Image: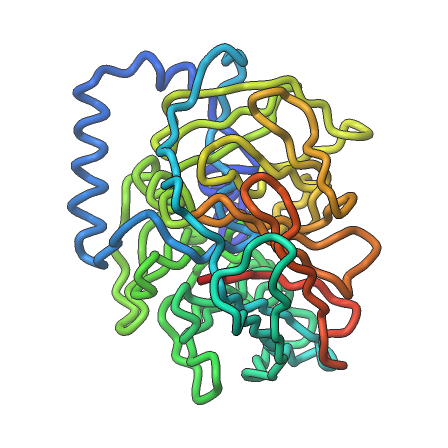
């Protein structure tokens, strides 16, 4: 028997939502008792790691996407998202994280910090001040694709986690490593952790743990305590729901010519027609906090982290969003309704947009080490 390959197939089939979506029509027929039991499992398990509020301000490009599909849903089904406060303002600080490969065995983690000395910015009235610094160097085996596909910074900006291939899982997983973003010794906090998928690792909102999948015959999923490495398994649907809530209230999928957005627990579906260019296999990368916008990747047939955006679809109209800055290639949705975006063909510029898509500010990507690169993760506020 080829156990590693069996493990890989099992892990991908059961954990990578963007690779093998599940039909949610059956879920719609479940009784309220089943939903209650699942939420009880979720609540009791997450209490071990102090999940905290779902209103997190950290948004990774790998967050908010994935999940199960509702092929039969129609656009008439409505999502009832929480309404942002009328007084909500865009965050006034931002950290933009970049990776730079150095040879075949090193990745440098850089951050560009953005501040507004004038206070809360109004569109077009306040110029940001930025500075870029190198945080730490991450070493890994040559040709190991796990680290670059899994590196993710905690919401509080203090820790960074990644997976290093253990050499026995054919690049699908390995050892979970956690370290201070500013340097120091990395600590192993788990083994057989999957590094594939659009969101291989997801931090809990309070930065105390990570949601992970395990490469095993049972395709275990759960949460790892960052300080100790203690692993608490979760029932799969509770895990998917918790992962989603860590980055926002909604998740989405693309299947059978439909783009579908649901709440974190898979209910209240809204579906619109969507046909990817050239009939490529794509995944939903993120959904805005109010459920109105969904960003779709440029490809998804290879179960690895997707960063570039093909389209941002307005779920109320089913049409691509037209941004005032042009065609966007990266989008980070924020809890207050604002956005940070990168523009295709111009990696030297980033933009902060208000909820109504007006330009708040234009941000220059500075620093020779990150020149020509767009960030892989943004943490605002």
Residue drawn at x 21%, y 23% as measured from the top left: 34
Q: Residue furthest bottom?
A: 184
Say if residue 131 shows up in the picture.
yes
On the rendered structure, is 65 left or right of 46?
right
Q: Give residue 333's position: percent from left, percent from top.
A: 53, 47
* Position above or below: 327 against 313: below
* Position above or below: 344 against 192: above
* Position above or below: 32 against 168: above
Dividing the picture into quadrants, the one containing residue 250 is top left
Q: Give residue 293's position: percent from left, percent from top.
A: 56, 34
| Coloring basis for residues | rainbow
Residue drawn at x 72%, y 49% as measured from the top left: 329
Residue drawn at x 48%, y 61% as measured from the top left: 120
Residue drawn at x 61%, y 77% as measured from the top left: 110
* The C terminus lies in quadrant: bottom left
- For this rendering, which residue is in front, 201 or 182? 182
Q: Give residue 129's position: percent from left, percent from top.
A: 61, 75
On the rendered structure, is 68 left or right of 53?
right
Say if residue 164 shows up in the picture.
no
How many numbered discs? 0
Q: Give residue 19's position: percent from left, percent from top.
A: 57, 37
Dividing the picture into quadrants, the one containing residue 101 is bottom right
């Amino acid at each position: 028997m080829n156990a590693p390959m069996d493990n890989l197939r099992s892990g991908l089939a059961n954990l990578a939502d963007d690779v093998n979506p599940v039909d949610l029509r059956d879920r719609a027929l479940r009784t309220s008792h089943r939903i209650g039991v699942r939420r009880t499992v979720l609540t009791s398990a997450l209490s071990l790691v102090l999940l905290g509020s779902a209103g997190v301000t950290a948004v990774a490009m790998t967050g908010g996407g994935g999940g199960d599909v509702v092929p039969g849903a129609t656009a008439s089904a409505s999502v009832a998202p929480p309404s942002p406060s009328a007084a909500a303002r865009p965050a006034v600080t931002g950290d933009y994280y970049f990776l730079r490969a150095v040879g075949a065995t090193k990745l440098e983690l850089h951050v560009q910090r953005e501040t507004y000395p004038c206070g809360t910015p109004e569109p077009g009235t306040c110029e940001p001040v930025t500075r870029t610094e190198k945080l730490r160097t991450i070493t890994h085996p040559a040709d190991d694709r796990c680290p670059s596909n899994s590196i993710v910074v905690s919401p509080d900006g203090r820790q960074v986690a990644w997976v290093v291939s253990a050499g026995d899982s054919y690049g699908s997983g390995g050892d979970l490593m956690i370290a201070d973003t500013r340097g120091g010794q990395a600590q192993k906090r788990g083994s057989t952790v999957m590094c594939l998928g659009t969101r291989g690792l997801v931090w809990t909102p309070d930065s105390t743990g990570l949601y992970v999948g395990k490469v095993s015959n049972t395709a275990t999923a759960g949460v790892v305590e960052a300080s100790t490495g203690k692993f608490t398994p979760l029932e799969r649907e509770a895990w998917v729901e918790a992962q989603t809530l860590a980055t926002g209230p909604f998740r989405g999928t693309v299947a059978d010519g439909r783009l579908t957005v649901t709440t974190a627990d898979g209910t209240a579906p809204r579906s619109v027609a969507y046909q990817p260019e050239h009939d490529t296999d794509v995944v939903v990368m993120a959904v805005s906090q109010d459920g109105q916008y969904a960003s779709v990747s440029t490809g998804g047939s290879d179960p690895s982290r997707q960063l570039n955006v093909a389209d941002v679809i307005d779920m109320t109209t089913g049409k691509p969003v037209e941004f005032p800055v042009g065609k966007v290639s990266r989008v980070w949705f924020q809890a207050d309704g604002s956005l940070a975006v990168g523009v295709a063909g111009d990696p030297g510029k980033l933009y902060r947009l208000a909820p109504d898509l007006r330009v708040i500010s234009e941000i220059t990507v500075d620093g020779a080490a990150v020149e020509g690169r767009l960030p892989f993760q943004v943490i605002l506020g």
